[in-house]
Image: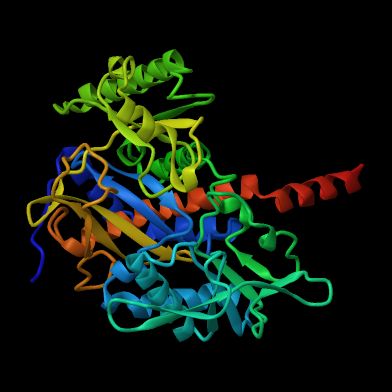
Amino acid sequence: MVPHLITALSGPLLELESKVLEATPTIERWFRLEWQEHTPPFYCSVDLRNSGFKLAPVDTNLFPGGFNNLSPQMLPLAVQAAMAAIEKICPEAKNLLLIPERHTRNTFYLQNIARLSSILRQAGLNVRLGTFSEEIKKPTWVGLPDGNRLLMEPLSRLGLKKQRLGLKDFDPCSILLNNDLSAGIPPILENIYEQYLLPGLHAGWHVRRKSNHFAAYEEVAKKFAKVVDIDQWMINSYFTSCSNINFHERKGKEELQAAVEQVLKKTAKKYREYGIKEKPYVVVKADAGTYGMGAMVVNDQSQLKDLNRKDRNKMSVVKEGLEVSDVLIQEGVYTFEKVNEAVAEPVVYMIDRYVIGGFYRVHTDRGPDENLNAPGMHFVPLAFEQNSMPDLGAKPGSAAPNRFYLYGVVARLALLAASLEQERTDPDMEIAYLAKHSKRR
C-alpha cells in the first residue's frame, strides 16, 4: 500500500522552497566549493523536522543505523556513493572490517548491518564483521527474520607489533565503525596506525557533543542563508547548553531554567515576527548520546522546578548507562508531516557527500511537538518515484521530488557542519597544526 503523505507548508517555507529551487545551480556550486575545503564523514544520517514554517535538523548521526529502512530502489545510489568514498580514501581497498554495536539480539539493527554490508560488497569490497561483544568468542552465525544470517567474529590484533586490527584470518586495509563508542574506546581499538579507521575515534560520543555540532551548523546555515537570501532561522534552531547538571540531586536546576527561558524568549520573538500561532517549546536533551534517550519537551521553565522521579531518571542516564551532566537546550521544531494520519519526520541518509535516500520516522502515539525516536515508532521509505533533483518547472509546494530536494539541501548543510565539527575535534589535525607552526618558528 502506498502511504498517504500530508505535508503542510505555510508562507515562510514556501518562500524558502521557491528560493532554493531558483538557486539550484548556485547551491550545487556552493556545495562543490565547500567540499574542496572540507572532507565529509564516510556516512551520516540527519533527522529533520518540517513545521510548515521552518525546516531544520534536530539530530545528526555519524554512526547511522537504519540502512534497512531505505527503499531498495535507491540502493544503486548508495553503492555509487560508497564507491566514490572508497576511491577517495583508499583506491586499492580490497578488505573492509565492519564493526557493529555490541548487541547481537536486536534483529532490526542487525538487518541494518546486513544491508550496509551488501552495499559495501557491491562497491567492490570483501566485508567481514568483527564485534566487541564479550558473548562472541568464536565465529558465530546470527539469524535474521528474513532467513538470512550474519557471521560475527571476535576481533584480533594482527602483525608483529600488533598495530593492525582484523580477524584471525582477515587483514583489512579499512575499518568501518557502526558503533558510536558511547562507552568509550575499547582497548583493542587503540593505537591503530596502519589502517584507515572510519570515522575517526573522535566521532564517538565519548568525545562528541551536540552543542559543538549545532554551533558548527549555525555557521554553515548563516553562510548558506546569504547565498540564497533567506532568514537563517528558517533552517536553523536556537540553542544553548548547560554543564554540571545532576538531575537526581537537582544540581544546576536554576541555570537550566534560565537557559530554557532564554531559548523560549528568542523563539517567541521569531514566532511573533512571522505571525506563527503555535506555542514555542524547547527540547532538553543529553549533549552526548543517541537512540532518542535523555530527552524531554519543556514548554515553560517552571516545569523544571519539580521534576518527578520518572523524569529525573529518564534524563539522568543514556545509552550504556552513562550519566548525563551536560545538556543541550534546543528550540523545539514542530513536525506537521503525517503518514497515514500519524505524525512523521524525515530522516535523510548520506554516504560521502551524496544523498542516497531516506525514510519517514512515524509514531502513531506521539504529537507534533514530541520526540518520535521512541518505542512504538515505525519507518516508511521516502517515495523516490523520480530522482531527487528538483523539477525547476514545477510550482513550489506541489511535487514530492521538490520536497526531497529541499530535505537533501538542509541535510547536506548538517553534513557539512559535521565535517567542520570533526575537523575541530580531530587530535591529528591539532598535532599537524602544531607541527606546522613550530617549523615556522
Q: Nearer the viewer, residue 402 or 323?
A: 323
Q: Picture quarter containing residue 188?
A: bottom right
Q: Is residue 351 above or below residue 340?
A: below
The answer to whether residue 299 is left or right of residue 182 is: left
Q: Picture quarter containing residue 307?
A: top left
Q: Position of residue 62 (x, y in %)?
A: 48, 56
| Residue 27 at least partly seen | yes
The answer to whether residue 273 is left or right of residue 426 is: left
The answer to whether residue 295 is left or right of residue 399 is: right
Q: Position of residue 58 (x, y in %)?
A: 35, 43
How many numbered callouts? Answer: 0
Q: Position of residue 202 (x, y in %)?
A: 62, 51
Q: Residue at x 66, y 85 (%)?
A: 169
Q: Nearer the viewer, residue 98 or 360?
A: 98
Pick the quarter of the image with the C terminus: top right
Q: Residue at x 58, y 73 (%)?
A: 137
The scheme the figure's colours follow is rainbow
Pick the quarter of the image with the N terminus: bottom left
The answer to whether residue 24 is left or right of residue 249 is: left
Q: Residue at x 36, y 68 (%)?
A: 67
Q: Position of residue 365 (x, y in %)?
A: 14, 45
| Residue 22 at least partly seen | no
Q: Is residue 103 above or below residue 123?
A: above
Q: Nearer the viewer, residue 306 or 439?
A: 306
Q: Residue at x 21, y 52 (%)?
A: 376
